[in-house]
Amino acid sequence: MTESTPVRAINNLNDVQIVLKDLDNFKSRIESQVWNLTGRQIKNGGVATDPNDFVVLKQLGGLDQIKQAILNDLPIPLMRTLLVKDTTVRNDAGDHVIIFGNGGPYSARFFFGVLRKAITVDLTIKVHHKFQGVDTILGTYKIPASQAVDNPVQFTIGTLLQNHAVLTWDILTSDGSADGDGIASFTLVWF
């Protein structure tokens, strides 16, 4: 039975057997067919302007547009880095940097430390989060002296950060080395 086959009149048992065979063949073709819906309409399949609109595949845009739309919905990571040029143990070591974004508060997600030069003593820093006169310690983080250069260390962090808070840093332990281009860097990433 095909779509163009006219309806068969059933006059005898032989006609019934032919119809049943045609139906069985038709069912087998339907179940095994890979459907090609080229040119078909998909109701509410994408960029419809109202629930009753129909959208065809060419209206959905190319794969690149779909990927870009997905990327646009992802949070943008923001970050601040402390570049340690002088590892002398001291408080308030390095630049004061601001937390920023779309209004906050933000969730600190990642904190990394990486050596540019080899060190002989563990390099440990303390990170302060200063907001409206309140100094909160985000944590203490250490790059071991055994850590290879350019092999980052990832630290666990899960702290809320306030928009326009200021980060400051203390160096707690080190070998006191210095280099104008930097010994190490620590990077805080938030969303």
Image (spheres, rainbow, N blue to C red):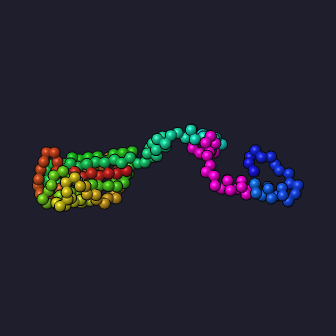
Give the left or right position of residue 34, taking residue 75 as reference: right
Rendered image quadrant of residue 136: bottom left
- Residue, x 71% and y 55% (percent of image)? 25
The magenta stretch spans residue 42: yes
Specify the quadrant of the image occupied by residue 108. Answer: bottom left
Spot occupied by residue 78 in the image (x, y as percentages of width and height):
34, 47
Residue at the spot x=14%, y=50% of the render? 86
Residue extending furthest toward the front: 14
Is residue 132 visible from the viewing direction of this image?
no
**Residue 78 visible in the shown view:** yes
Determine whether, in the image, residue 160 is placed left or right of residue 83.
right
Which is nearer the eye, 25 or 132? 25
Q: Looking at the picture, tell me which residue is in the foreground, 24 or 155.
A: 24
Place of residue 183 in the rendered image (x, y in percent of width and height, measured from the top left): 16, 51
Range of residues picked out in magenta: 23-46
Q: Residue at x 11, y 53 (%)?
A: 177
Residue 40 position in % (x across, y down): 64, 42
Along the viewing direction, whichever of 122 and 19 lies nearer the viewer: 19
| Residue at left offset 19%, top offset 54% | 149
